[in-house]
Amino acid sequence: MILRQVLKAKIQKVKVTEKHLYYEGSIGIDGEIIEKVGIRSGDRVQVLNYNNGERFETYVIEEAGGSKKIILYGPAAHKGEIGDEVCIIAYAFVTEDEKIEPKILNG
């Protein structure tokens, strides 16, 4: 069976609200936001920083719903500053016959 990796979800134009260097490393995202696009805690995501051009991969930690928090934890804290605008992308593996409609949310 051949699997393809395709866009599952995209959270565009959200701003980094906090950074915490001494942590295992991940990105914290408001629980309401990830629920809307179908991302779960622990999912692997790619983060693109509009301000400095950085791109990195990490995993999601769910923050309190409604908190509007986007937090860079651990080494990811070096990839952006508070106030930077980022795009968070999640992918899924599908078979050749499967199609998924990506969920896109503008921050």
Image (cartoon, helix red, strand yellow):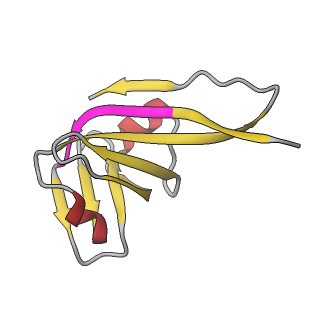
Residue at (10%, 45%) from the top-left corner? 83
Residue at (24%, 46%) from the top-left corner? 53
* Magenta stretch, main secondary structure class: strand
- From the top left corner, tell me how far across and down residue 75 is, in percent: 29, 71
Quadrant showing the N terminus: top right
Report the front residue among 99 and 62: 99
Residue lying farthest right? 1
Residue lying farthest front? 53
Residue lying farthest bottom? 22
- From the top left corner, tell me how far across and down residue 54 is, in percent: 27, 52
Residue 13 belongs to the span the image colors magenta: yes
- From the top left corner, tell me how far across and down residue 40 is, in percent: 51, 47
**Residue 98 horizontal side relative to residue 69, left or right:** right
Report the front residue among 32 and 76: 76
In the image, residue 22 sits, relative to residue 71, either above or below, namely below
In the image, residue 83 sits, relative to residue 28, either above or below, namely above
Give the magenta range: 9-16
Residue 19 belongs to the span the image colors magenta: no
